[in-house]
């Protein structure tokens, strides 16, 4: 029984990082309907930026801010370099896929050149490695911190989208760019703000997962992109609470399949189960009719 | 307030408007009549910068606005209530109203929201409801309220009575009259000519991209040409 609860603890801490990353994905892919294949590279970029900040001696909360802002800036750059250029020329979305894939490869290449291809690790922290044993279940302070940070980011995003003027502008652009123009919302700047939010979430998720596994590598974003996409389809495209729930679910499924089946089948079971869920609920776990774009 | 001279605009290479001129004096309510496809919506879209105008002048209080983007035009005091209302269906009534105030930086948005709620009690009752779940008349009120939230000096309305029950149409026209009487200049596009001419003091008739007739509301109501074409079976 303690194995079971141990997996719940591990699954929730892993799932919370997936949820943070997936929220960013659902903003871009679901809300704006833009296919940004560089989203995984932003995750990797955030992990490295946080790592470098930590190595420079910044305390962990500040390093997280660096990862967050750095991811946001990289997100804005991906909009400026790829998507704004394509919009100005009337390019269709599959061109964005190819162009952002190219951008992702450039970023991975740069990371290899700058940081090397070997796996890197965060400086050890005596504080974060504090752990408690409760009834045979081991809980690390690091896990607690990751979950708390994730929940705070979720709340911040929810407040931004629901209560701020920028959030209403984002939702209006998502509904219809023409309607946004009619009420005087600057469409280009609002899309850029969305890229910043999504990039910041990806960057933060990169640092969180980099700490959880204590592994940072130039290729860590590739797999993450696929997971992010899977999670947002599971949660219902463009549905932020759905992305959160989907992230936790995928984290739990992965951890349990490693513990009870085999680590070789972790991804097969994860993606397979999601496929089965989608067969039953094709529009995603949490989609409501009125959530869909008009 | 608004002077349009020799405006040409359209979609792609073809101009729908073949050089139209019209004028909306400050404080007035002017209507633009015309059959389906005459170019009424195109005129409003070109005025507010939603589509580019290929030539001509659009002067707002004497300043050229033809090349400005719509967000700038809104900031200069022009709001559009678009054809078909175009409320954000998956946002609440209140969020629709608040996004109408997006261009504003002042601290009176809250009191303007209260003012819109006073004007449209129904919107206040339904403020937490999704806009898409409201009736056509309620959505029209919301579209008007959203435009008012930008504090326009010139309000452009595109067929606000379209598809609404007669009682609701009366409410909408009464509201337009009240807004105009409170000092907002109005340019009203309508197919319901008789109703439009009951609030407007002056009218233009648009026929396939040209102004074919213009005059005071009384003149238009008496003109046999207008009566035959646009007032024939109107209530
Ligand atoms: N987005 C568009 N792309 C291409 N052509 C368009 C577009 N919108 C309108 N048109 C054409 O422009 C002409 C004028 O259309 P417009 O919508 O301005 O007419 P209208 O007077 O508003 O008509 P209605 O009373 O039906 O609303 C029509 O011939 C129409 O087919
Ligand atoms: Mg029209």
Image (cartoon, coloured by chain):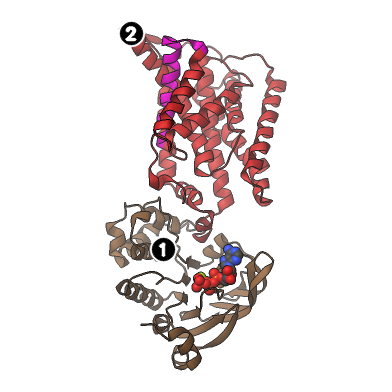
Chain colours: A red, B brown
Q: Which quarter of the image is occupied by the N terminus of chain A?
A: top left
Q: Nearest the camera: A53 or A157?
A: A157
Q: Tell me what residue is drawn at x 67 percent, y 26 percent.
A: A108
In the figure, is residue B208 to the left or right of A21? right
The secondary structure type at the circle numbered 1 is: helix
- Give above or below for A238 relative to B50: above
Q: Tell me what residue is drawn at x 50 percent, y 14 percent.
A: A265
For the residues bearing labels 2 and 1, Cβ distance under 8 angstroms:
no
- Report if residue B41 lies within the magenta region: no
> Residue B114, can we see it?
yes
Specify the segment rendered in magenta. Answer: A241-264
- Report if residue A243 lies within the magenta region: yes
> Residue A63, can we see it?
no
- The quarter of the displayed image where residue B162 is located: bottom left
Q: Position of residue B43 (x, y in %)?
A: 57, 72
Mark seen at residue A274: none
The secondary structure type at the circle numbered 2 is: helix
Q: Position of residue B138 (x, y in %)?
A: 34, 63
Q: Position of residue B32 (x, y in %)?
A: 50, 79
- Give above or below for B29 relative to A125: below
Q: In the current view of this chain or complex, which residue is farthest to the top?
A: A136
In the figure, is residue A51 to the left or right of A243? right
Mark seen at residue A2: 2
Residue at label 1?
Answer: B143
In the figure, is residue A64 to the left or right of A1? right
């Amino acid at each position: 029984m303690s194995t079971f609860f141990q997996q719940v603890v591990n699954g929730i801490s892993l799932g919370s990082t997936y949820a943070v990353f997936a929220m960013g994905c659902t903003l871009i892919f679901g809300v704006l309907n833009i296919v940004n294949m560089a989203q995984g590279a932003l995750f990797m970029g955030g992990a490295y930026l946080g790592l470098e900040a930590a190595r420079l001696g910044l305390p962990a909360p500040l390093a997280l801010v660096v990862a967050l802002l750095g991811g946001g800036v990289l997100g804005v750059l991906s909009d400026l370099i790829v998507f704004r250029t394509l919009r100005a020329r009337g390019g269709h979305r599959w061109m964005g896929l190819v162009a952002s894939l190219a951008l992702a490869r450039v970023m991975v290449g740069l990371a290899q050149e700058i940081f090397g291809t070997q796996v890197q690790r965060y400086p050890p922290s005596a504080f974060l490695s504090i752990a408690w044993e409760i009834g045979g279940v081991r809980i690390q302070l690091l896990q607690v911190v990751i979950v708390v940070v994730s929940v705070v980011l979720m709340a911040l995003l929810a407040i931004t989208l629901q209560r701020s003027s920028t959030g209403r502008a984002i939702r209006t652009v998502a509904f219809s760019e023409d309607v946004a123009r009619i009420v005087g919302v600057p469409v280009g700047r609002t899309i850029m703000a969305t890229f910043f939010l999504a990039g910041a979430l990806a960057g933060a998720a990169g640092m969180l997962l980099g700490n959880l596994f204590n592994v940072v590598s130039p290729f860590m974003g590739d797999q993450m992109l696929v997971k992010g996409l899977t999670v947002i389809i599971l949660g219902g495209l463009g549905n932020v609470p759905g992305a959160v729930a989907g992230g936790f679910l995928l984290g739990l499924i992965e951890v349990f399949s490693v513990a009870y089946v085999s680590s070789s089948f972790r991804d097969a079971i994860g993606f397979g189960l999601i496929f089965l869920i989608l067969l039953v609920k094709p529009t995603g776990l949490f989609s409501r009719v009125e959530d869909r774009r008009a | 307030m608004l002077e349009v001279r020799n405006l040409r605009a359209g979609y792609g290479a073809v101009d729908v408007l073949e050089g139209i001129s019209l004028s909306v004096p400050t404080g007035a309510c002017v209507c633009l009549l015309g059959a389906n496809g005459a170019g009424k919506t195109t005129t409003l879209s070109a005025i507010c910068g939603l589509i580019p105008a290929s030539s001509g002048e659009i002067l707002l209080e004497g300043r050229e606005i033809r090349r400005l983007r719509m967000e700038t035009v809104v900031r200069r005091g022009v709001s559009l209530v678009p054809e078909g209302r175009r409320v954000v269906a998956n946002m609440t009534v209140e969020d629709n109203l608040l996004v109408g105030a997006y261009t504003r930086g002042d601290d009176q948005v809250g009191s303007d929201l209260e003012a819109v709620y006073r004007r449209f009690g129904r919107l206040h009752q339904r403020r937490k409801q999704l806009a898409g779940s409201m009736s056509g008349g309620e959505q029209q009120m919301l579209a008007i309220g959203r435009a008012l939230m930008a504090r326009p000096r010139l309000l452009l309305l595109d067929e606000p009575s379209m598809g609404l029950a007669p009682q609701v149409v009366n409410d909408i026209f009464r509201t337009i009259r009240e807004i105009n009487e409170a000092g907002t200049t109005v340019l009203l596009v309508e197919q319901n000519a008789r109703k439009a001419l009951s609030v407007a003091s002056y009218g233009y008739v648009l026929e396939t991209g040209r102004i074919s007739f213009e005059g005071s509301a009384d003149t238009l109501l008496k003109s046999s040409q207008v009566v035959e074409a646009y007032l024939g079976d109107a209530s």
